[in-house]
Image (cartoon, grey):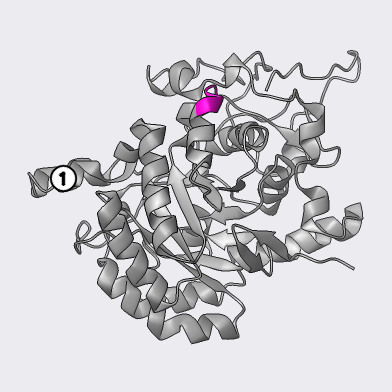
Amino acid sequence: MVNLSVEAGGLALKNPIVVESAGYIVDGFGLRRMIKTGASAVVTKSNTFKRFEGGPAPRCYWYDDGHMAMNGDEALLNPGYTYAARYIKENKQFARENNCHIVGSFSPRSPEEAVTIATELADAGASALHMDLQCPTAAPFRNQEYPNENWDHLGSWWSEDPTRVRDVVKAVKSAVDIPVWPKPLIFRFTIHPEAIETMDSAKPDLYAFMAPGAPRLYINILTGKPQPGPAAGRFRTNVRLTADLARLTKTHLLPSGGIATVNDAIEIIMAGAHLVGICTAVYRDINTPQKFVDGLIDFMVLQQFTTIEEMRGVALKHMAPKPGPESDYYNIFVSKYIKPPPGDYQWGGMVRLEEDTEFEHLKEAKKPDPKKPSAEIQTEL
């Protein structure tokens, strides 16, 4: 018998699928739509102290249809935390009836403001709190619109220093009695264990995160081993970052970004994820969460897993105990804006590919040459 339930992020959840924060949850109608999808939790749009309008509708479009890439205008829309608290309160009973948790998301400018917003959302009935400490777009826009109001302290400002993350998480944890899920730019700190330890000292219940463009990792879900394979796209980096963080912290992990198929979900659980966040895929198909749930059941039955925990992190035993310098996401890739060279590479001594195509299904994966002796990837992850 298959059991999808998990204990993660301080919550008991019916399955590991979470609808991540986005513009499809800015009111009660959007919240109810997502609660009915079959996900175990839904994260509201990240709210600020003040209400902000997004760009004029229509505000979402696909600029790279093949890779499900969107423009960012929807990120600038949020109804403000008091309105969010109201629609959470109005729908908490509906969420209970559907065995789904509402996670209130917000982006503060100071620890004091974080406490104010967190208390309001907790009192309204949120099961947990999700703090956006990573968005790179909101602060520049808002600071230009409203100078001298500290709007430059939104989002990614917090992730410039791990002590900022620690301090705001501590402040919120001391003010509420529900789980706290910060979402920092945690890839900045993968080769700095002391920075991870600094953030861990605040005792967050879970880290939500996304990854930049490199380095990358492919895990064969039929063997649970890292191996040469498709490496293009953000999802590959999320697999690598998840595997790195799973060996750096005991805090639970909620990766999101580029997770488009049930095989993606399986792979990232094998890399150590406790929960799986989906976002862009939900814009494409609101039935995606239930498809993931059904696909997980099918896979677990075929592979004789009975629980998600049995599957979680199975790839880690094939990797080095700690990430090495090739997992320096910030200096290898982000800070220098280095783009992968033609043909793409799995950074950190991984295998060069001949194609750039993002393979979404296992049957499309690049097969090893049977004429050549097999060799384990020498990951110093």
Residue 300 quadrant:
bottom right
Q: Residue at x 41, y 34 (%)?
A: 162
Q: Residue at x 37, y 53 (%)?
A: 171
Residue farthest front in this picture? 174
Is residue 339 at least partly visible in the picture?
Answer: no
Name the spot of residue 364 as percent of width and height, x first.
Answer: 73, 38
**Magenta highlight range:** 190-194
Name the spot of residue 62 as percent of width and height, x first.
Answer: 39, 49
> Would residue 26 be found to the left or right of residue 68 on screen?
left
Residue 349 quadrant:
top right
Is residue 106 at least partly visible in the picture?
Answer: yes
Residue 298 against residue 319 in the figure, above or below: below
The residue nearer to you, when weighing 210 against 343, is 210
> Would residue 170 be found to the left or right of residue 208 on screen?
left
Please, what is the three-letter code of the amino acid marked with disc 1? Asn
Which residue is disc 1 drawn over?
150
Residue 101 quadrant:
bottom right
Q: Residue at x 40, y 53 (%)?
A: 131
The residue nearer to you, when weighing 47 against 250, is 250
Residue 318 against residue 50 in the figure, above or below: above
Q: Secondary structure at mark 1?
A: loop
Within-10-Å neighbours for mark 1: few <14, some 14–19, many 20+ = few
On the rendered image, what quadrant is the N terminus found in?
bottom right
Name the spot of residue 124 as percent of width and height, x first.
Answer: 39, 77
Name the spot of residue 18 as percent of width and height, x first.
Answer: 57, 61
Q: Residue at x 80, y 63 (%)?
A: 297
> Would residue 117 be found to the left or right of residue 217 on screen?
left
